Image (tube, helix red, strand yellow):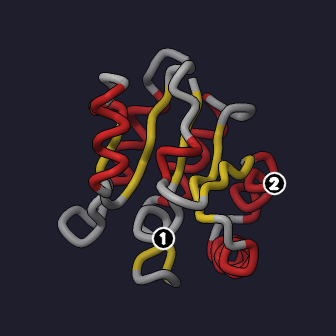
Amino acid sequence: MNIYLEIDSVLLVNGETLANHADAFLQAIMMKYPDATFWLTPNDKVRRDEVGKLLTSQLKPETAALLDKIKVAEWNGVASDAIDFKQDFLWFGSELWQEDLKALEKHDVIERFILVDLAKEPDILEGLANTVANSAA
């Protein structure tokens, strides 16, 4: 299974503060899917580098060390362009654009998008970390 992670509004609140339970969430994912986890990020290396530094500076050292294993799934148009629909996957994101929704519906995989709304549920990553840790790989 592939795991696709958005950074802003999933791991970072307001683009700069680490979300509650981000350490546990990342550790759970990397324990289960160390070779199949991707940053789902626009093709913007400068922003990726900035966010990487922000994450590294706020995560526990043992979690920060795991970030190097996460691959980058780049996209230029819509995020779903970076998804490998031939593989099973989960996509953790903060919003779903219309074009991405259409792509998920076309492939009949809308349930694989996990909405992370830190404003409504600031502790959502705790539950997601437990779900990932207890799921079958």
Q: Which residue is mark 2?
A: 68
Q: Position of residue 76 (x, y in %)?
A: 59, 61
| Number of marks drawn | 2
Q: Which residue is mark 1?
A: 8
Q: Which comes sooner in the sequence, label 1 or label 2?
A: 1
Q: Residue at x 66, y 79 (%)?
A: 47
Q: What crowding class fits label 2: few (fewer than 14 Cα within 10 Å), some (14-19), or many (20 or more)?
A: few
Q: Quadrant of the C terminus?
A: top right
Q: In the figure, 60 relative to 85: above or below? A: below
Residue 136, compared with residue 27, is above or below; it is: above
Residue occupying image coordinates x 27% and y 53%: 98
Residue positioned 29% across, 40% down in the render = 102
Which secondary structure, mark 2? helix
Residue 85 vs residue 102: left or right?
right
**Picture coordinates of residue 14, whole percent (x, y):** 41, 83
User: Which circle, 1 or 2, is nearer the viewer?
Assistant: 1
x then y, percent, for residue 110: 28, 32
Query: What amino acid type should be assigned to the residue bearing mark 2?
Result: Asp
Determine whether, in the image, residue 94 is placed left or right of residue 67. left
Rounded to the nearest whole Å, what is the CA distance between mark 1 and mark 2? 18 Å
Q: Residue furthest left?
A: 120
Q: Where is residue 1? Give x, y as percent.
A: 57, 23
